[in-house]
Image (cartoon, rainbow, N blue to C red):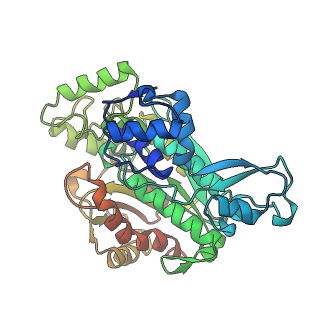
Amino acid sequence: MRIVRGDRGTMVEYVQLALQRAGYPVTVDGVFGGDTCRALAEFLEKGEQDCIVDDSVFESLALYLRGSVRYEVQPGDSFYEIASKYHIGMQALMNANPGVGPLYLMPGMTLFVPLPFPVVPQNVAYSSFLVRYLVEGLTERYPFLEVGNIGQSVLNRELWYVRIGNGERELFYSAAYHANEWITTPLLLRFVEDYAQAYAMGKRIGGVDAKWLFDHYSLYVVPMVNPDGVDLVNGLPIEEKAYEQARAIAAAYPEIPFPDGWKANIEGIDLNLQFPAGWEEAKRIKYAQGYTTPAPRDYVGEAPLTAPESAAVYQFTKEHDFRLILAYHTQGEVIYWKYQDYEPARSYEIAQYFGAVSGYAVEETPAASGNAGYKDWFIMTYDRPGYTIEAGMGKNPLPLSQLQGMYEANLGIFVGGMIKTES
């Protein structure tokens, strides 16, 4: 890694975000200009001539992306003094260090100390690179979260999952199947963080007692199903061969802007057209539309489940007993609840509830898009409620200015997805 003055892009945003969180008055605009350089020089205690971010410098900034520090207890330290030093409450410090009694601190002991800001940012573009730091940071702050991966992408990026809750009833929420719909990643991660905080602090989330939810449900969240595609759209460094291949694929479809119009995985396969539920019909429709080869969108692949990302979601689902699934996309502010003539018990009732709490329309999937999706396969295979949620409104990729409104609209869906499986 090497980022220098004059550079632009998402990696610069991450440097600026870290500096901002460290207390420097930096604007997160993705432009490595004079203000960013001066802040970095002050952070590093060096001159501005050393205004370079390499791997070691970024690692020193990364704790501000994770949102916590490792603190070695000194003689005479107390929980109160440590919490005061980092401007956090004692409860937050105890939540991050279960089993460590405030009266039994030992010199040399290492504590995780949360920093006084949320882990999940709402002012930067997302990538697989950032998601890794956020997942690490959430588990350091809330060690009751379970984190792992359901597989790897084409370029061997982790497909992270987070589990929150210990209940018998399992649910699954996933996002960013389509690369330029990456705003759904912070949408889900913010819910995970808010839910975890509510549980840790004994509060409510979406009007429901978080401890009751935690004890009754196990919620699995995969925030980024298509990390390679998201990295391509947001300008993160990817292997040169893969980038050139994607650019060549896009050149065959000049009407689709590159990279902003890219929805597929890095090999040009649409991950939400990869599931064995009417795949042949989806192929017929998309071929008729001209998507007969790898493309930035709408290419179904040579067969179902040939894309490793879709195959990972498929296998992960088979390994669990999900009562309900939500697959997040953008845009249109609409909830799709049905697959062909399959209507699982209470699925329409739950869809109507989701529409009421979000203000989104409840509709049947259009025929041109009504096959080979994840929720299609889930409904057909398990006869249980599955939903595609099209969040936000406008042209993809949606701007981050919509994220707060999207979250407010979907909070009732996130919580309702659990409580509506109760009866």
Can see residue 376? no
Image coords of residue 157 (percent x, y): 49, 34
Query: What residue is drawn where x is 16% and y is 35%?
Result: 290
Q: Nearer the viewer, residue 247 or 70?
A: 70
Q: Nearer the viewer, residue 224 or 59?
A: 59
The image quadrant of residue 357 is bottom left
Image coords of residue 211 (percent x, y): 64, 74
Q: Is residue 160 left or right of residue 25?
A: right
The image quadrant of residue 339 is bottom left
The quadrant of the image that shows the C terminus is: bottom right
State whether residue 183 is above or below residue 207: above
Image coords of residue 314 (percent x, y): 49, 46
Query: What residue is drawn where x is 15% and y is 39%?
Result: 288
State whether residue 91 is above or below residue 145: below
Q: Nearer the viewer, residue 255 or 204?
A: 204
Q: Is residue 59 left or right of residue 227?
A: right
Q: Is residue 28 left or right of residue 210?
A: left
